Amino acid sequence: MQASGSHGLSLFLSLFLLLRCRGNALKASAALMERKMEENTDRNVEAGSETGGEDALVGNVNKLTVSPPGYTGPLRKGHLIFDACFESGNLGRVDYISDFEFDLFIRPDTCNPRFRVWFNFTVENVRETQRVIFNIVNFSKTKSLYRDGMSPVVKSTSRPKWQRLPPKNVYYYRCPDHRRNYVMSFAFCFDQEDDVYQFAYCYPYTYTRLQHYLASLERRNLPYLQREQLGLSVQQRRLDLLTITNSENVSSEREKKLVFLTARVHPGESPASFVCQGVIDFLVSQHPVAQILRDHVIFKIVPMLNPDGVYLGNYRCSLMGFDLNRHWQDPSPWAQPTLHAVKQLIVQMDQDPSVSLEFYIDVHSHSTMLNGFMYGNVFEDEERAQRQAVFPRLLCQNAPDFSFSNTSFNRDKVKAGTGRRFLGGLLDDTSYCYTLEVSFYGYMTVASTAPVPYSEEIYMKLGRNVARTFLDYYKLSNLIKDNRPTNIHSTDGMSQTGKSKTGVGRDTSDRKSEKNQCSGRS
């Protein structure tokens, strides 16, 4: 997408940062006494990394033209126009530094200035071959996968498929010019004057995209899929609940095994939606494994638990500034209505003697770790603790990007209000509650020497493999007719546009090579 070579852009950014650092070094000696006098202010700034720093940022930029200071002439090509006033957009401020450098400020989550991570904005009125450096200057997190090779994603009107920027064009560093906050700088060269370019922290998955996807499923009139509105958000957006199972399974008198899955309680964690869609795509497919699972298990899925936060472009919070995944113990029906509705449903199902609620899985994305992995709970009963490790071990065998060695079981106090912790204490000892995490960046395999970046499709593959793993967990493989293969092929799940996906199944040699890793000996 960039007109000139990636190497040239990397050199351009490296020289620029080197000159900036040398300039800062020359200033350091003269500023030493001043810094000592301002130690108290600095301490307040460090607190500001948690409480907001740029407290004036309360809205997104709206078709903001950024031209040189004092310029009053007509708009010229190369005077960039920034916009984030669209669904899931986030950019609070743009500062002109020079013709080729701009400081960009993330808008904090609504009603909660602590969280500043997600960004999603467009740039237009570019000049062909125009080189720029964008500095995202007010991240609220110090640790980031940007240090390990992660890069933002970009698309344009003539090339609508998201792609990651070359990692060598991205730098993540602590900057004295910005209150010692961490800054992510990336170089880019515009190559199409008529294009509108869009940059984001990771692949966006909006509320509207979900609604279109669910509507397309409904139009298929599948007898084993039911969509219902479980509730409404504060801003009156749908809280959707999908039930996927054979109708005879629901009406039968035998005990019903139930798996409950939720995603996007943290709105900026967009990969969770791709994983969730992968689960749904597989479960509604005609794959023999999916058919058997529908005959034996009821799947209930809430694909977007925080629709307001997603729509608004928040990273972690709801419209009213609540981290919903810390309010499971006593959610408010008016301030946290979506969480309240889901909790009520789970409690109701847990009290139904005809239902065995066996799994609760909450899907998230992780900003500092690689691979997919799980968090589970700690139990005093050693046998129960060992049983809880079974599903992650099986998933590790089915998904090359899932890491059992990264999976952990804990009872951290700070996690007490999460769905995993609260429901783990509420449900009986036959139920297992997990947080499924997937990296914003990429994954390592047994054979890889560097992280493999995730794409939208690979995130969905993980979801399909999560669904596939329930066949192994419930030991239903013997029901596959005529010894048909259980690998998941490209026709199993269909994307939102109806195009087939690449395969995700693995052969016996793959499983053998990963056996040690999945048994915790990596």
Image: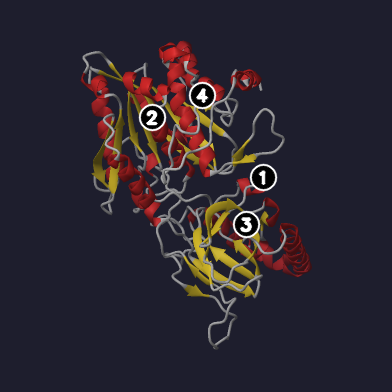
- Residue 331 can be seen, yes or no: no
Q: Residues within 10 Å of mark 2 (few under 14, many from 20)?
A: many
Disc on the earlier residue, 3 or 4: 3
Q: Which residue is mark 4?
A: 487
Labels 2 and 3: the sequence-earlier one: 3
Q: Nearer the viewer, mark 2 or mark 3?
A: 2
State the image quarter where residue 513 is shown: top right
State yes or no: discs 2 and 3 in contact (Cβ < 8 Å): no
In the rendered image, residue 515, in percent from the top left (x then y), is placed at 62, 18
Query: Mark 3 belongs to which amino acid?
Result: Met
**Residue 27 visible (yes or no):** yes
Which labelled disc corresponds to residue 148?
1
In 3D space, how far apart are the residues under numbered discs 2 and 4 (Cα atoms)? 14 Å
Pointer 3 with pointer 1, Cβ within 8 A: no
Q: Position of residue 148 (x, y in %)?
A: 66, 45
The residue carrying mark 2 is 283
Q: CA distance from mark 3 to mark 1?
A: 12 Å
In the image, is 504 to the left or to the right of 417? right
- Residue 108 is marked as none
**Where 58 sits versus 291, above or below?**
below
Q: Which residue is mark 3?
A: 184
Query: What residue sits 30% from the left and 26% below the top?
Result: 245
Could you tell me the amino acid type at mark 2? Leu
